[in-house]
Image (cartoon, helix red, strand yellow):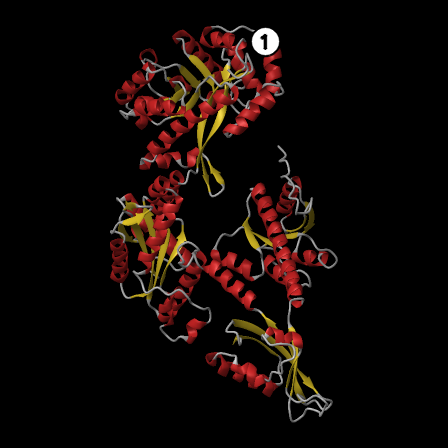
Amino acid sequence: MTPSPPAADADLPLQPEVLLVDDDEVNLLLTALALRERGFSLVEAGSGEQALAKLRDWTPDVIVLDAMMPGLDGFDTCRAIRRLPGFENLPVLMLTGLEDDASITRAYQAGATDFFVKATQWSLLAGRLRYMLRASRDRIELERSKAKLARAQDLARMGSFDWRRAERAERAERADAGGLLLLPEALRVFGFAPQDTVGLRTLLRMVPQDDRRALLRRLHEALRHSSVLATDVPLVLLDGRQRIIHVEAEPEFNEHGDNIGYTGIVQDVTDRRTAEDQIKQLANFDPLTGLPNRRQLIWRAERALEQARRLQHQFALLLIDLDRFKVINDTLGHGAGDELLVEVARRLRACVRHSDQVVEGALEAAGVRSHRSLEAVGRLGGDEFVALLPEVAADRDAERVAQRILESLREPIFVSGQECFVTASVGVAIFPRDGASVVDLLRSSDVAMYSVKAQGKNSAAIYSPQLAGRGREKLELETALHKAIERDELVLHYQPKIDVRGARMVGAEALMRWQRGGTLVPPGDFIPLAEDTGLIVPLSEWALREAARQARQWQQAFGFADSIAVNLPSRMFERSDLVEHIHQCVTAAGVPHRVIQLEITEHNLMKEPQNVIPSLLRLNEIGVEISIDDFGTGYSSLSYLTTLPISELKIDRLFVRDLGVTPQSSAVVTAIIALARSLGLRVVAEGVETLRQMEVLHRLGCVLMQGFLFSRAVPAGELQRWLEQTVLPRKAPWIGSAIDGLGGEGGDGADGDLAARAAGARPFR
């Protein structure tokens, strides 16, 4: 199916022009076809030489360059492109089949803007290109803004001056010939009246003594070499105000080539320097706590790592995560949460030799032990902090600081008049043992920190190799999943159940999704981990609450009166409080118990039936229906169908897929439908994707279906729009087929009765 091009970005070209360079004709053809389908205009080149020839009289919007080519490879081609006039900043995406760090580093060193590992993920490639185009556009706009700012500064209030060597000055009628001449505008910059006469000595006396000697050395140096002078000079004006004056001057020469003086301008740049200082403060320090922020922490850590590598000593990084901060923040409010963070920051700051200001370039000048000035505590983000220890002799040094941090947090903290106790989990990573880069150290300390949380929190742990490998990957995913619950990253998508006889929605199935970093994670990638770690319990409890809330919202919006099916693992049915929890969910939402339908797979149902059956019976008593999911794929006895309070069987998509293709699938489906009819159970066919499958299912006696033919699992708001725009106007192809092809046929059994009732029901049931 041809992908529809993405919505046009108003600030990007309608069809961005791409130069695609690849010596592999198949890759060139496939990539060009995929990008054209996604709204790009392509010019193709089979080698680096051809690409450079095309660029002589044409400039594309972006270049996609294969790394490995005979002759002039992608790296050399990229270097040659960067040497062309006007191509210094053109976006270049390097396509590579290699994922090793050396190839990636080589691509960046050659001048590539970004790299992309060769794959068939064309939409991801197109998205990467559009991102690069937007970044290029932003860079151009930034350069334009800088140019406008420069022009505006030229028009700002400033003054001119002339300075002449007294011994070379020509006698003139002016009494001040042979010295400093400030024009009226310049006099105003220094706080003098236009009629005042001011000499160089007067101005030098306005410079603070600590800065005066350095300024005099700079002036003598410029005069000795007849060089341009450009410097900022701090002054204290006669009225006591402290200002920063920018001085810029060029030498002037007589006809003999002798330096006769300087001419230049002065400008009060105090406001600009203040703004620059504020920008530096905001860029490097957290506005709430005043601690170094993520950017400053990373910079300090990289410098500390460089020094540790050069001087052959160890460097420790401590990741500090507050326990139960979300509870305090949600209970007492964000203002109280901010107060807590400020106090925590103050206590953490006292646990190390914290240094606020570290100037780039000053480390080398400070001597061999200058790296010790990098020691600090910073706020990484949220309730996470980092302590940098630029030099440790052994693990016990880092452990001692970690224990000091834990001890500092044991005392209560008063916020908003409330006494609160907060603890922390601390993960420690040591360079070079636990990582060769700052990223590696952060990752290792994160793994160590969450191992503390898994063991009860309020402690510290040093990273060990036992946490690496697959266990490390699992722990990282578990860490992210823990945060998904805390940060409300979980969402439910809904797939409607359809009665094809009446072309109506008669319920929906809730399917959990995880929005992790802007990407929708399918349940198959995290549900098994949640089951292994026990996180499936809070996930399932959340799903029940959310489904009940959504049922209430739909009820108010369009009269929804059916049930939402929620998939539950077997361990949830083993919980003695499951019935009470569901009762609390529906009561809080103000909906009846029948609004919630529970789905359990045949395999989970029979895994420990003695523990599951009591809950099923109690749920049936309060009106909660039970549906058996993936029916027909298990290996258990069918006798449980006659004894358990089951209301619905769902035919597994495995059998639906081959309907109309293999007679075996039709036979299995026919048997399931006949069994359900004889027991008075509803039958729902899952995974219906084609009209053929729908027609065969109906002919076999099944009228309740769900699948991509009708709708994918979509967010709640989109499902309501689907009803209003597709079902009510009867615009979908399956509706016409259902009415024309199925309208004259009768149904019997449980599904036939349900369909008959649906025919006279309201549009939204």
Vertical position of residue 244 compared to residue 121: above or below: below
Residue toward you, 575 or 672? 575
Label count reads 1
Where residue 156 sits: x, y (%)? 65, 67
Q: Is residue 427 left or right of residue 512?
A: left
Residue 604: tell me if it is visible: yes
Measured as percent of width and height from the top left, residue 62 is found at 65, 52
In which quarter of the view is residue 608 placed? Answer: top left
In the rendered image of this protein, does residue 351 appear above or below residue 362? Answer: above
- Residue 373 place in picture, x, y as percent: 37, 68
Q: Residue furthest bottom?
A: 167
From the viewer's perspective, is 740 left or right of 641? right
Q: Mark 1 is on which residue type?
A: Gly
- For the residue labelled by badge 1, is the local secondary structure a helix, a strand or a loop? loop
Where 756 falls versus 357 (above or below)? above
* Residue 327 horizontal/vertical position (percent): 33, 41
Can residue 429 be seen in this snapshot?
no
Q: Nearer the viewer, residue 630 or 267?
A: 267
- Tell me the quarter of the picture where residue 746 sits: top right
Classed neighbour count for the residue bearing mark 1: other residues with Cα under 10 Å, few (<14), some (14–19), many (≥20): few
Q: Which residue is mark 1?
A: 743
Tell which of 280 and 487 is nearer to you.
280
In the displayed structure image, the side of residue 628 where residue 112 appears, left or right: right
Position of residue 333 relative to residue 283, above or below, is: above
Where the N terminus falls, by quadrant? Answer: top right
